[in-house]
Image (cartoon, rainbow, N blue to C red):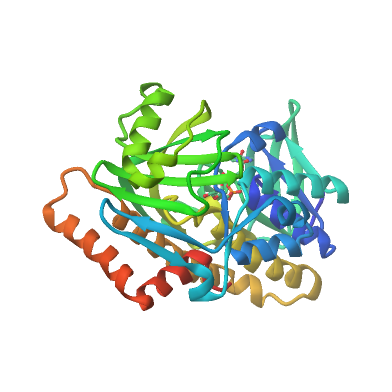
Amino acid sequence: MKTQVAIIGGGPSGLLLSQLLNKAGVETVVLERSTRAHVLSRIRAGILEWGTVELLNEAGVGARMAQEGIPHDGCYLTDDELMVHIDFKELTGKQVMVYGQTEVTTDLYNAQDAIGTTVIHGVEDVSIHDLDQATSYVEFTHEGARKRLECLYVAGCDGFHGVSRRTIPEEKRSEFERVYPFGWLGILSETPPVHDELIYSNSRHGFALASMRNENLVRYYVQVPLSDKVEDWSDQRFWDEFSRRIPSDAAARLITGPSIEKSIAPLRSFVAEPLRWGNMFLVGDAAHIVPPTGAKGLNLAASDVYYLYKALIDAVKGGSKTGIDEYSARALERIWKAMRFSWQMTTMLHRFDGEDAFAEQMRKATLTHLATSETARRDLAENYIGLPF
Ligand code: APR
């Protein structure tokens, strides 16, 4: 089997890259370990930067998002005393879009079907070879047989636990990591949102986030110790804890209902460098992880894809290698800025076990500063709506 770009991983990064490349006449084969149903069942991000929205439109998958997505003009940050509105629209002229990752992935799979691209599910034992040669190849097992896929380039879109990053020799890789000492317990519930914009709450009982997926589907979170298990949290316990962590007027309006999904995610910041190794490029979670505070994970995957798809089209069709030569540095510059923002939001909004009184004062001062300085709010808004590609 032969293709121009072999894409390892059929999550949002791999599918969006495949979609944009195929639209431009560059052939791809996507190799995905799981079934399509499994990929589509993973509940993840839900806030799209406007640059991501535009890239999805460019990929030809924006129609349902335009109908069903909910543009948001701002969000709220609060502790028990102060409530600060960050008005993205007024401060930056831009909005974000509430549209779940599962919806984005569904639209991408449908679009891939419509143009007839090759997505192979259920591949095992992927290995990547000859990255320093003119032609590289990927080996994998599918339906019991070992197969070989020859290609010009490999895109490693296989998430944090994938094989692509580990194909770069350890001594040639730098990894930067910060693990936070808590997780987020998240639930999905078919109830109307408690507020029409997101509320990030740093209460004295710990962090909570009131987010949403649509008019009748909420995604709510509370900060929990890493030792907690999902089984420790009945729906009732979740609702009790969530309502004491959000502002009292919001809590008074809160409509509760059964959870249809409940999970605990650890919080981590992680970056691997470089993003290029010979003919292979790392994209999305394969190269970096952000804590969810600030909603940058899916959006960073989109900006990586933006830099890489143009570079690959040039390299495959036009013969110019400048884009692929510059990919790692260009993408990393934006990645580090999003890392900084996510880390800052996480530090500002969570209580850390064993922290001193100084840490609490710093959080308070940050919120007061945001309340009183338009410059500070604009800086936050600019990062939240997404830095330019
Ligand atoms: N071979 C083939 N496929 C693999 C392999 C492998 N060895 N390892 C992992 N995969 C697949 C996974 O099954 C998954 O479908 O690669 C895909 C990676 O998808 P994601 O983990 O969703 O990563 P990505 O596509 O980069 O999506 C961006 O950023 O913060 C997050 O919520 C955001 O999940 C989103 C991500």
Relative side of 165 to 66, left or right: left
In the rendered structure, the answer to whether residue 270 lies left or right of residue 312 reads left
If the image is split into quadrants, where does the C terminus sit?
A: bottom right
Residue 287 visible somewhere in the drawing: no
Q: Nearer the viewer, residue 120 or 229?
A: 229
Quadrant for ligand 1 reads: top right
Q: Residue at x 74, y 62 (%)?
A: 57
Using residue 110 as the reference point, say whether residue 323 is left or right of it.
Answer: left
**Residue at horizontal 61%, vertical 73%?**
325
Q: In terms of depth relative to the viewer, which is nearer, 91 or 330?
A: 91
Residue at screen point 33% across, 44% down: 248
Residue 361: image location, x then y, percent: 17, 60
Position of 138 compared to 187: left or right?
Answer: right
Query: Is residue 175 positioned above or below 125 on the image?
Result: below
Residue 273 pos. (x, y %): 46, 61
In this view of the protein, can residue 52 be seen by the observer?
Answer: yes
Quadrant where the image shows the N terminus: top right
Residue situated in front as seen by the camera: 22 or 312: 22
How many marks overall?
0
Q: For the point 64% across and 70% down, which residue is it?
A: 324
Question: Where, by quadrant of the figure, is residue 245 drawn?
Answer: top left
Residue 328's spot in the image, x, y percent? 54, 67
Picture layout, residue 145 above or below residue 20: above
Determine the residue located farthest toward the left in the rendered image: 357
User: x%, y% of residue 130?
Assistant: 65, 54
